[in-house]
């Protein structure tokens, strides 16, 4: 039976009954990265250096060296990324069970609120209003906060002001509700971090990072194309690079959704 299910799955991708949606931004040197206060270490942007290009350096091949932070571009946060998750078992990208990278996904559409308020935050009340329409969030789901922030670029994406960045994210109670009451697999946003831009002002600071990773959950940042996903019914594939003791990794995030033929 399992073999037939997998065969049917592959056939439906070929037929278009299942469509693949890429939720990943293209890595390039201009893609914004998080900016921390100057007294802290900084996240490196993506860089590419050509090794050879069918020339005297290598006549039959082209390749490049690349460098970046683990947390550059569309990326995955492992529990070891935050102090609250540093002592957990299987807390780095190389030790996470691979089946945890694949799961059902729900999308909470906050785009109307974020269009009116850059500092819009996801609360338990907003989550429960969503559930009243779409049903209770299933245990083990990926939960993605749609804000349409991925349609911004450059300075508008980071949205830095005199008091720091301004971008949407969850409140402490919002992320704790998803963890404690719904036992989610992980939480993802279209912004440069899982926390709101002003998340440092919450208690604890950066509550999405603190509570997610302290509970052994995962974070996804800099997502794209969430407007192409249904509220429920999609499946997410979010597998980071297998970096020894890695705290995170850029990755190619794919969602499987019903196709036009289904």
Image (cartoon, grey):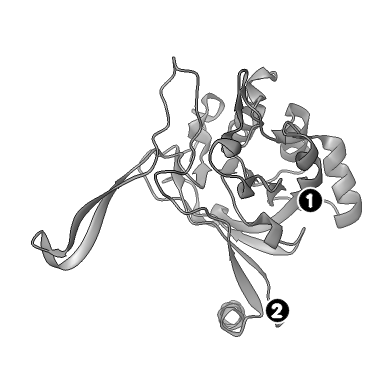
- Where is residue 169? Give x, y as percent: 69, 35
The answer to which of 105 and 87 lies nearer the viewer is 105
When asked about the image quadrant of residue 117, the answer is top right
Q: CA distance from mark 1 to mark 2?
A: 25 Å
The answer to which of 241 and 64 lies nearer the viewer is 64
Quarter placement of the N terminus: bottom right
Can the viewer see residue 193 in this picture? Answer: no
Which residue matches tag 2?
260
For image coordinates 39% across by 49% down, the residue present is 242
Q: Residue furthest left?
A: 56
- Where is residue 100? Give x, y as percent: 56, 52
- Where is residue 42? Give x, y as percent: 42, 27
Can the viewer see residue 180 in this picture? Answer: yes
For image coordinates 61% across by 18% down, the residue present is 162
- Relative to 234, 20 lies left or right: left
Within-10-Å neighbours for mark 2: few <14, some 14–19, many 20+: few
Q: How many marks?
A: 2
Q: Residue furthest top?
A: 39
When asked about the image quadrant of residue 120, the answer is top right
Disc marking residue 137: 1
Q: Earlier in the sequence, mark 1 or mark 2?
A: 1
For image coordinates 66% across by 25% down, the residue present is 199
Within-10-Å neighbours for mark 1: few <14, some 14–19, many 20+: many
């Amino acid at each position: 039976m399992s073999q037939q299910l997998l065969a049917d799955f592959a056939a439906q991708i070929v037929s278009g009954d299942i469509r693949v949606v890429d939720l990943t931004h293209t890595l390039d040197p201009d893609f914004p990265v998080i900016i921390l206060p100057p007294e802290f270490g900084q996240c490196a942007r993506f860089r590419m250096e050509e090794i050879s290009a069918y020339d005297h350096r290598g006549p039959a091949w082209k390749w490049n060296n690349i460098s970046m932070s683990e947390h550059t571009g569309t990326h995955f946060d492992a529990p070891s990324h935050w102090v609250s998750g540093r002592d957990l078992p299987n807390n780095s990208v190389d030790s996470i069970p691979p089946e945890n990278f694949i799961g059902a996904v729900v999308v909470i559409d906050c785009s109307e609120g974020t269009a009116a308020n850059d500092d819009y935050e996801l609360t338990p009340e907003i989550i429960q209003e969503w559930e009243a329409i779409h049903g209770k969030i299933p245990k083990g789901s990926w939960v993605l906060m749609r804000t349409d922030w991925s349609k911004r670029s450059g300075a508008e994406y980071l949205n830095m002001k005199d008091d720091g960045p301004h971008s949407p994210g969850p409140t402490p109670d919002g992320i704790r509700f998803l963890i404690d009451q719904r036992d989610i697999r992980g939480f993802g946003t279209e912004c440069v971090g899982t926390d709101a831009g002003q998340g440092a002002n919450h208690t604890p600071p950066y509550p999405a990072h603190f509570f997610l990773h302290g509970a052994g959950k995962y974070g996804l940042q800099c997502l794209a194309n969430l407007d192409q996903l249904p509220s429920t019914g999609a499946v997410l594939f979010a597998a980071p690079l297998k970096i020894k003791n890695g705290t995170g990794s850029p990755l190619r995030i794919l969602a499987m959704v019903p196709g036009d033929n289904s």
